[in-house]
Image (cartoon, coloured by chain):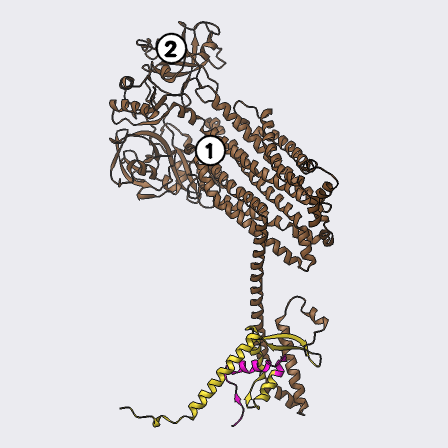
Amino acid sequence: MGGPVDILRGTMDVLILRAVSWGPIHGYGVARWIEGATGEALKVEEGTLYPALHRLEERGLIEAAWGLSENNRRARFYTITTPGRKELRHETAAWTRFAQAMGAALDAPGPSAAPAEG
Amino acid sequence: MRTREPMWRRYARFFGPDANADVDDELADHLARLRDDLRARGLPEPDVEMGLRNRFGDVDMVRAKLRRDDGRRLKRRFRLEAVGNVAQDVQYALRRLRQQPGFTATVLVVLALGVGATTAMFSAVDAAMLRPLPFKDAGQLVLMPSVTLPSPYRDLTGPTRDDFQPTWANMRAMPGLISGIAAYFSTTANLFDPERPARVTVGHASADLFNVLGAVPIVGRVFSDSEARVGGPRLTVLSYGFWQTHFGGRDMLGKAISLDGNPFTVVGVMRAGFTFPDRSDLWVPIPVPFPPPVLDFSRGFPPQPNTIARLAPGVSVDQANARLYSLWHADPRTHPPAWMKDWAQKEQERWEQTAVPLQQSFVGDRRVTLLVLLGATGLLLLIGCVNVTNLLLSQAALRRREIALRAVLGASRGRVIRQLLTEAVLLSLAGTAIGVAVAPAAFRLLSTVMPPTLAGLAPPELDFRVLAFAAGLALVTGIGFGLWPAVTTSRSDLADSVRGAGATGAGGQGRNGARRVLLVAELALTVMLLVGAGLMLQSFRRLTGVRTGFDVDHAATLRLDFGSPAPPTTVRRQRIASILERVSTAPGIQAVAATGALPLDAPSAMGLGISAEGVPDRPKTERPRMATYLVVSSGYFAAMGIPLLRGRTFSAGDDALDTDGASPRAAIINRALADSLWPGGDPLGRWISWSGRSAKMTVIGVVANVRFFGLNRRPGPQVYVPIEVAPPVSVALVARGALPPAALLARLRDGVHAVDPLQPVYDVRTLDDVVRQSVAVPRTDTVLIALFGGLALVLAVVGVYGGIAYSVAQRRIEFGIRAALGATGRDLATLASRELLYVATVGLLLGLTGAWAAARLLGSLLYGVGVHDASTYVVAAVVLLVPAIVATMVPARRAARTNPMDVMRQE
């Protein structure tokens, strides 16, 4: 394994859903969780989190509310909604299948082992 | 973790969500945390800023993207919410309207009547009289009475009037002012058609007429300048209607038709609806220059061509007149010589008005009727609007509590207003839509009432501008007054309203006042219309009740015209005699006769001065004694059923002419003449003579008076002479017999065609129809005004019902208390209807006064009834009052049945 890889398209949403699934969390918290959970292997440009967060909110998968942070700043907290949970389950399963399929494919023997055509 | 934001934050978003501020706050929070973290890791300050950039990316770009996206989302959400709210409002409004079917239906009916009936009525009035002429840009069309067609003969001896005023040629040379000029007149002619001989109206048109009026043929072409000249080809263009009815729409191009014996080649068919002038069946060219027509004394004066012009686009009539006047006044060459000064002086005014708007010259003497009917239309629309206003106000007052309650429960003023607006819009839209849907049907119904002869130049047509206006007014009224409760409630003390002050009447005094004023206005306007309708009905009843002086039953008539040029007198005399002989021998005919002019048939009978035996002539300075000169065949009085009072009717030999070769030896006079010449004396055997003639006619008989010039005109003096003396060119035949009208008419027609199979007959009808058609105009006026009155009555009764029903509902508590305290049902009913009594008295008095003052307008339309006919006023008041009282009974009985316990429980 070398340096951190760029986060794959479409994976950000699943990661965010996972991040907010434990309870209200602000954007900064999400960034920190992703960083920690992936062992810093995935590089998230934190600015790109917010468009994704707002898009998920628009789709009704997460909810946002304004609250006050520990140091008395206005902070926006996100929580997952029921449709969000459903989506998360679905996407997780899909990811697992995808990863398994990719793994199987990459471990499979080369085409030369296949019987030759007449 | 989820803490509440401080109070002041709420005010930062006082004017609604602010997407930009939210984005800024959120990003600021993130960056601050990140910075704290980096610092906590002990990074030096410059590295902190670098770390921020590294980890977060381009802050400005992210911020811009978020602001853009979030702003868009916010807007979309607002829109969705608004739609959702409207849907909710509509649902709620529909439920409410369904809950009060009575109120809803009433408002809908009133709105529909107001819009539908008013539009239909106005369109009918409009079609009869007011409609802009059915020509392209009719506003630019003018008549130019002083500009005449050039004549081929030029007076060589000196100047003529045409040298000193704008001429035809001048007008054609001013394209900036006048874009076209044309001439027209109309005559009638016999169409010699072996299968269907017909009398047709011939429009004479200079080549440019169609172009000036913007009329294009649908088949073929119109005349060209080179064809419209003396000695040019005989061409004709058919009207669409005549082409369809007479020729069945078959191909006529290039075919010849025969008008008064002359062949005309059909070159075109005009578009449908164009029949100018005088409902022309077909057109022939007017030659330019125009030779003076040959005088045909048997027909009287030949028709004069009228000049019509189209002003250039953008030029007003006033501008055109001013310009023409200044042009002709500025040029010394066009100043008339001194000896023409008198004429010039007289013509001065006419010059200043070279152009007269076409519309103005066609409305003419129907102006008064027009005014009355338009006034009635306006009144009706006004009554409708007042009515809706009143109903909505009543409704509004009843809802004050509901609205106040909703306000107290937290509905914002905007929300309440939006809800009420939705209801008002729904109600108004529905009512107006019904009105718009009903208007064409109502109009078709009205069109059947209107005699086609009245429908002016334009075919009747629904006027969509008026429809739009009436619908707009209804919408504005409905919406405006539907909003009333929201506006007033939000101003007044909510607590008061909730406690019920508004509902018991104590707080609603001002609004009740407004309601009463409206009800009074409505009743007053209705009484005015009813008085007008009553006067017209009364007048029409008197008019049709008038004794005509002849017997309209079992008699029929038709006309024939010997064509132009007319055959000689001897031929006409012979033909009339042959026809009469044929018809008189046919089975079932009791009497048949010929005359020049039928009574009540828009006759143009001549009046002549007369002298009489033993009666001194009037001095020269006074008007001479006049009598109507009528030529009749011997059976005329029997055929018409005009009683012979003394003496005898004509017999053989009476037609012998005196030495002057023009006067008969015998005459029959009517009673009016006998009474005026020899009051109390015996006229038989005495002589009368035409003024200035020496020949004396002996009076051989006296007949009863006949209404001749109109049912509303007293019979004047008349002299009948034998038709053989001066056989007219246009003859009316009358037959009497105990046959069905169709058979009677068939006998007449057969008689005519036995003598000349190509002779067209027209004006074929019963004598009854002659009388009926003579009052077609007053009948239409009466029917229209009576309809206005009836509609107004319906609206007024609805209004009264609504008003009283409201007042009873509003005073439920009061009635409950009174009932509890021992008031009987009768007491309560009286109490409930007392308001009507007050309102009705004031309304009736005002209305009757208004009618009294405005009735003068009707004066010229009335016959046999004064504009201040007291009984009509009384009847109008009663006609309004009785249904109004009945309308009051329903709510009053409801009041009478008020059960105190129910009231207490509900309140």
The disc labelled 2 sits on which kind of residue? Ala
Chain A drawn in what color?
A: yellow
The disc labelled 1 sits on which kind of residue? His
Q: Is residue A71 above or below residue B519?
A: below
Q: Residue B40: where, in percent of width, then height?
A: 68, 90
Callout 1: chain: B
Mark 2, other Cα within 10 Å: few <14 / some 14–19 / many ≥20: many
Which residue ends up furthest to the right in the rendered image?
Answer: B821
Q: Is residue B175 magenta?
A: no
Which residues lie in the magenta part?
A1-29
- Labels in figure, total: 2
- Which residue bears the numbered disc 2? B667
Q: Is residue B730 above or below residue B27?
A: above
Mark 1, other Cα within 10 Å: few <14 / some 14–19 / many ≥20: some
Can residue A55 be seen?
Answer: no
- Looking at the rendering, which quadrant does residue A68 occupy? bottom right
Q: Residue B783: where, in percent of width, then height?
A: 49, 32
Helix, strand or loop at disc 1?
loop
Q: Is residue A16 magenta?
A: yes
- Looking at the rendering, which quadrant does residue B517 occupy? top right
- Picture residue at 50% right of the left edge, 25% below the top: B541
Asked if residue B380 lies left or right of residue B254, the reply is right
Is residue B106 or residue B743 the one in the foreground?
B106
Chain B drawn in what color?
A: brown
Q: Residue B897: where, in percent of width, then height?
A: 66, 40
Q: Earlier in the sequence, mark 2 or mark 1?
A: 1
Asked if residue B197 lies left or right of residue B24, the reply is left
Callout 2: chain: B
Work out whether disc 2 and disc 1 sit on a shared chain.
yes
- Picture residue at 35% right of the left edge, 29% below the top: B156
Helix, strand or loop at disc 2?
strand
